[in-house]
Amino acid sequence: MIDMPKIMDKVVDYGIKKPLNAFTKTGFADNLCKNYQSNNAKYIGALGVTSIVLKDGLGCYMYVNQSLNNKSIPEDKRKFVASLDLTNGGLMILAQLLTFFTISNSKVQSKIFNKIFGKNFDGAAKKLYETAIKGSDKFKNITGKEFNVTFDKFKNDAKGFFGIFTSLVAATILAKRVIVPFIATPLADKAKKLLYKDDNKNQDSFTPESKK
Amino acid sequence: MSSVGSVSFKGSTSSILDAVNPREWAQQVNKEKDLKSELLKQMPNSIKLLDKMKNFVGEVPNIIINAVGTGLVAPVFIKYNPLSKTDEDTRTYSAWRQPVSAALAVLTQAGLVIPFNSVINNMTNSGDFFVNKYNRTAYQDLKYIEKTIKKENPNLSKEEISKLAKDKQYKQLENIIEQLYNKDTIEYTTKRGVVKLSKDEIKELMEQTAQDMLVKAKDNPHEKAVIKEMQDAIRDNKSVKDVHKIASNISNVKFAYDAAQKFISNTAANIKGMKQITGLAVSLAILPVTCCLLNYVYPKFMKAFFPNLSDKKQEKPQDTFVKNSDAPKDDEQEVRK
């Protein structure tokens, strides 16, 4: 009888654990650790950009290629589907790079956060909250230092979630799924014409008769 | 956000090194949490809403939001695009590629990316990495601790498990601080035995901690002078306790706490960096699979649910073989059809 758990253990062992352990022993992994530990923004940013370009670039190439050669897609729609894959992929890379350097950038997020929520965390607001909290029996003995530490942590947490939320809405929904398809669809018309142009060049040497 | 990366004990456990008492210490940490909850109650609704957003953070919500965007939002902007001159049938046909693609993305991500990350999490928490800087057995992830407690005690309630897990995590944290302060090392167990940080590793950790303090000190001359003294002491191979005493000249600074935090955040950073690369590798590896799947499933799906759109339109003989000069008319012909 087949021992499934044992097979799965082997799959995980040879498919994930061993390659991961081999990777962590490399010099590249060491370098990765050093840069992540020191929070080297340039290195982490470059890695993020490379990741986006590699993933989406390769994806775009493969999708276009497969769509163009997919005989199951009706011939009259095939080139538009492939063109949309092409423009969608290209714009997706651009959109992600743009959001990566703007809305998803921590400095930009910090500015937006301060603009929207800044007045809830300035000196005057802090004083008000401290007075209100110290007014309750539970926290009447809290020191100013304790309050300040917690208040700053609270602000940082709020800023962190704001960053995640804005990135999610701006990059994942707005840029990738609204703006990109909106621009990619009319651009696909033009890309399709280019694809037809290439075909026509090849077909110039044929005549309908010779093809028959 | 990694829970390992954000330790919430700093500044609220001033008595720990004077009188080490885990229960008292845990109570101090809880006091800070209570204060945060009270603060949230005082905040306006916009901040409360932001706080609720943290439930949407994580791998699964990300996959779902991405899939909803691909499957439901993008097709609308393809099909009803006023700027496109391509006929509506072709646009509708192309728009349906998005939900099919989204469904396949959910399947492949749920089937491969999530289990892959789960294996990495288990490996780091159980100490299964050969290179120790990726093992977080010294300070495990709260969810992992909860999972192990649940496995060992299936009859416990969710609240009980949560409390026990937090207590265990506090204890781990306390162990790190105590070992650093009293023994100048950090000792923890991995699957390959007991690991003890070397003198050089501790020295590097202390240097990193002092460097972080220097960045925070900005232009404060007193703090800068104290940190300089600390750095000299570290260079002279002084103990954590000695450097901790020097650091005490800056108010509200507990060097041993900061060093423990640095150790935990370093491990979290190592894992984060590794996940970035493995995530890329997994994505690239499954790309041909999702691409082939989409190309196989999509035409079949369209044929089954939209047979009218899937039939090739009747073309006149001259449509098939057009000369270069006729090429731009293709769209017009499609629209006429």
Image (spheres, coloured by chain):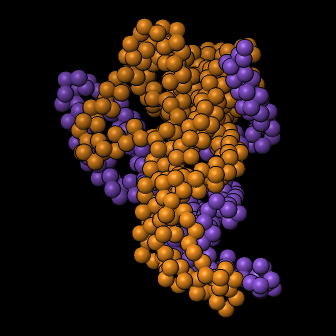
Chain colours: A purple, B orange
Residue closer to the observer: B52 or B73: B73
Instruction: Name the residue rendered at 50%, 24% in the picture.
Output: B143
Residue closer to the observer: B221 or A32: A32
Q: Is residue A57 above or below residue B63?
A: below
Point out residue B136 in the picture as x, y percentages from the top left corner. Answer: 62, 24
Residue B267 visible in image: no
Q: How many marks?
A: 0
Q: In this view, does B35 lie above or below A39?
A: above
Residue closer to the observer: A187 or B332: B332
Point out residue A67 in the picture as x, y percentages from the top left corner. Answer: 65, 62
Instruction: Name the residue rendered at 75%, 16% in the picture.
Output: B192
Point out residue B184 in the picture as x, y percentages from the top left corner. Answer: 67, 19
Image side of residue B199 versus residue B42, left or right: right
Instruction: Name the residue rendered at 24%, 45% in the picture.
Output: B44
Image side of residue B148 versus residue A31, left or right: left
Residue closer to the observer: B200 or B86: B86
Quarter location, residue A194: bottom right
Image side of residue A95 versus residue B34, left or right: right
Residue B47 visible in image: yes
Image side of residue B134 versus residue A181, left or right: right
Instruction: Name the residue rendered at 29%, 37% in the picture.
Output: B40
Q: Is residue B69 above or below residue B247?
A: below
Quarter location, residue B179: top right
